Amino acid sequence: MKDDNTLKLIKAAQKDDRIAFTSLLNQYWAEVFNFILKRTGNETDAEDITIETFSKAFTNIVKYDETYAFNTWLISIAKNVHIDMIRKRKKVSFLDINDEQQQSLNYIIDDTMNIEDEIIKEQNLAVFKNYIALLKPHYQEVIEMRFFQDMSYNEISEALHEPLNNVKVKIMRAKKLLAEIILKQIDQNFTI
């Protein structure tokens, strides 16, 4: 049974009310996170899955069917995100090699960066930073802290004096906006 306050928040979120999104996130974060943590046994995976769950839920909130409890809908999304993550990992880990074979591979693979690699890396980083500069300043700030200063979510929360969940949402939105900017730029380059 849904309470009226949750239903009001869902309706507001369907009208793109950011405060309603934040309220729903704060209300259901722990439930989804703890559910996934029990399934994965890994806090980092649980956090990533929970962030992606809320991202998908908020992107598709207009499709939410009121006949189901909101937390049930969120848990269903979380299960699907978890299954997708497992499938992706299975595709990546198709090679099963033993320690002796790994030792042989270590001699073959040369992962040291040469001058050309360094130049390419610097050029890619400069392009990436140009994309980041297109974001609003508060999104630029969290991206810089998270990915260039390697700060944890908790450290960012403390530095910005913001609740942890707000920081997670801000980073999630920043990543989504950054991906949209990059895809738009790629599309423009291919249509020229």
Image: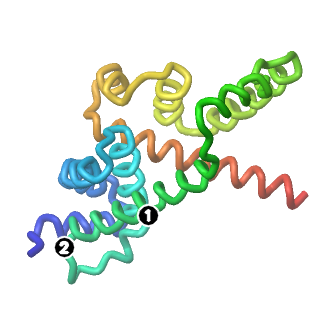
Q: In this rendering, is residue 10 above or below 162?
A: below
Q: Quadrant of the N terminus?
A: bottom left
The answer to whether residue 67 is left or right of residue 160 is: left
The answer to which image quadrant residue 64 occupies is bottom left
Q: What is the distance, in whole Å, between disc 1 and disc 2 at their CAs? A: 18 Å
The answer to whether residue 102 is left or right of residue 16 is: right
The answer to whether residue 87 is left or right of residue 167 is: right
Q: In this rendering, is residue 71 above or below 69?
A: above
Instruction: Sort mark 1 into few (<14), some (14-19) or many (20+) by Cα contacts within 10 Å.
Output: few
Instruction: Sort mark 2 into few (<14), some (14-19) or many (20+) by Cα contacts within 10 Å.
Output: some
Residue linked to disc 1? 59
State the image coordinates of residue 147 (x, y, percent, origin top left): 53, 28
Residue under the point 84% across and 52% down: 189
State the image coordinates of residue 28 (x, y, percent, origin top left): 21, 55
Tell me the kind of residue under disc 1: Thr
Between disc 1 and disc 2, the foreground one is 2
Q: In this rendering, is residue 168 above or below 143?
A: below
The answer to whether residue 5 is left or right of residue 40 is: left
Residue linked to disc 2? 69
Residue under the point 37% across and 63% down: 57
State the image coordinates of residue 162 (x, y, percent, origin top left): 28, 30
Tell me the kind of residue under disc 2: Ala
Q: In this rendering, is residue 95 above or below 107?
A: below
Of the pair 44 and 19, the residue shown nearer to us: 44
Describe the colour scheme in one phrase.
rainbow
Residue 39 circle label: none
State the image coordinates of residue 116 (x, y, percent, origin top left): 88, 22
Which of pointers 1 and 2 lies earlier in the amino acid sequence?
Answer: 1
Residue under the point 41% across and 41% down: 170
Q: Secondary structure at mark 1?
A: helix
